[in-house]
Image (cartoon, grey):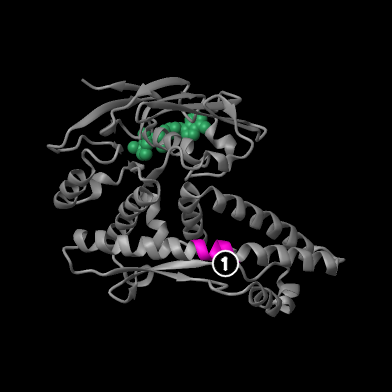
Amino acid sequence: MHLNSISLKGWRNYQEEKVYFSPGINLFLGNNGQGKTNLLEAIYFLSCGQSPRTSKIEELINLSGKYFYLKGEICRGEIIHAIEMGGARDGRRANKIDGIPLQRLAEVSGLLNTVFFMPEDLYLVKGGPASRRRFLDLEIGQISKGYRYTLGNYKKYLRERNALLKSRVQDKILLQVLTEKLADLTGPIVERRNEYLQKLSILARLKHRKLSGNIEELNLKYNWSIEPGLSHQEILERYAETRLLEQRYKSTLVGPHKDDFSFIINGCDLKAFGSQGQQRTAVLSVKLAEIELIKAETNKYPLLLLDDVFSELDEDRKALLLEYLTDRVQTFISSAEPLQTKAKVVPYWIEAGRISERI
Ligand SMILES: Nc1ncnc2c1ncn2[C@@H]1O[C@H](COP(=O)(O)OP(=O)(O)OP(=O)(O)O)[C@@H](O)[C@H]1O
Ligand SMILES: [Mg+2]
């Protein structure tokens, strides 16, 4: 599977562009602020309908326009599929696959899988739990439509329950109904997250061993709010245990929306003890593990988007990475400086929202 081309209209600093890609390694060069990250973001957006940088649609629309439109042509063997996505300033969205409108965004899952690695991903280690939950949800959502539906429903009932807890007069029966709904959905979410993280941890450990020259052992540890493996009744009891506190804090205090995970290296939590280089290598290991995991689950390699992180790797790691990617993963690298490499890369030049192939 590879992305054959992308068309952008009114996306970020792009007016109207269409560009064809190599199925191998594509390199986007250009000065700062020209649109390299915006292009990678558009490719990622086509895979899941979400941006890794913002959840506000209006930020994605060109300042002088009213809407954005993206179209990607995806080659899967002999067959070419088209994904189209549009968004307007009033928040309206329209998405199509092969010309057929999608009822729900979750339906886009699985057609184009991507793994994105950007400088902000260091926050995966350093930042708060919300960034790690977002990561888990986006990644699991890519390979499981069911997970996206379940999570979407969980969030809807959670919003309703929190609104009820904040209201002055509380309908006890409605509160019980909403708690039951959350308890129904909690099991499938935490089971899936636990299973995903266990698989990811094994693969990331192998990648990290290689990148660290066999001296570091990486583990991903799931810190759950309500642990996997509980019955419906036991989950309900967990929600009931915090009922009194909930009245004080006026929000739901347990459940998958409180889950987290940590990066452990040689037994120490990387967030507290890791160096910048160790943190970066651990995130890269996780990203490479994701590639393998998506391949194992879908039988196809995802696209890899490397935004401005390639140049920060030392020569050995760069060479190792390019060797692994060549002839395996369609890759998109952005960089402000040319790369010194023997690997076959197709370079493009980006300037003020215009993309040209560099001869
Ligand atoms: N909605 C928007 N409308 C118009 N321009 C935008 C919009 N969003 C972002 N931009 C502009 O896009 C430009 C390029 O952004 P981008 O992040 O892609 O740069 P880049 O080429 O990756 O640069 P760097 O090398 O510094 O990372 C910025 O100047 C920014 O102001
Ligand atoms: Mg950039």
x and y percentages locating residue 216 in the rendered image: 23, 69
- Taking the image as shown, residue 315 lies to the left or right of residue 64, namely left
Please, is residue 184 above or below residue 241 in the view? Answer: above
Residue drawn at (23%, 43%) of the image: 325
Label 1 sits on what residue type? Lys
Q: Secondary structure at mark 1?
A: helix
x and y percentages locating residue 56 in the rendered image: 58, 41
Say which residue label 1 marks.
258
Residue drawn at (28%, 26%) of the image: 348
Q: How many marks?
A: 1
One can see residue 170 in this view = no
Please, is residue 166 above or below residue 24 in the view? Answer: below
x and y percentages locating residue 40 in the rendered image: 39, 36
- Quadrant in the rendering for residue 81: top left
x and y percentages locating residue 273 in the rendered image: 33, 72
Image quarter for ligand 1 equals top left
182 or 319: nearer the eye? Answer: 182
Q: Main secondary structure of the magenta part?
A: helix
Give the magenta part as a residue range. Answer: 187-192
> Is residue 190 shown in magenta?
yes
Disc 1 crowd rating (10 Å Cα; few below 14, some 14-19, many 20+) is some
One can see residue 50 in this view = yes
- Quadrant in the rendering for residue 343: top left
Q: Quadrant of the C terminus?
A: top left
- Quadrant in the rendering for residue 247: bottom right
313 or 234: nearer the eye? Answer: 234
- Taking the image as shown, residue 114 lies to the left or right of residue 106, namely left
> Is residue 328 shown in magenta?
no
Residue drawn at (26%, 45%) of the image: 310
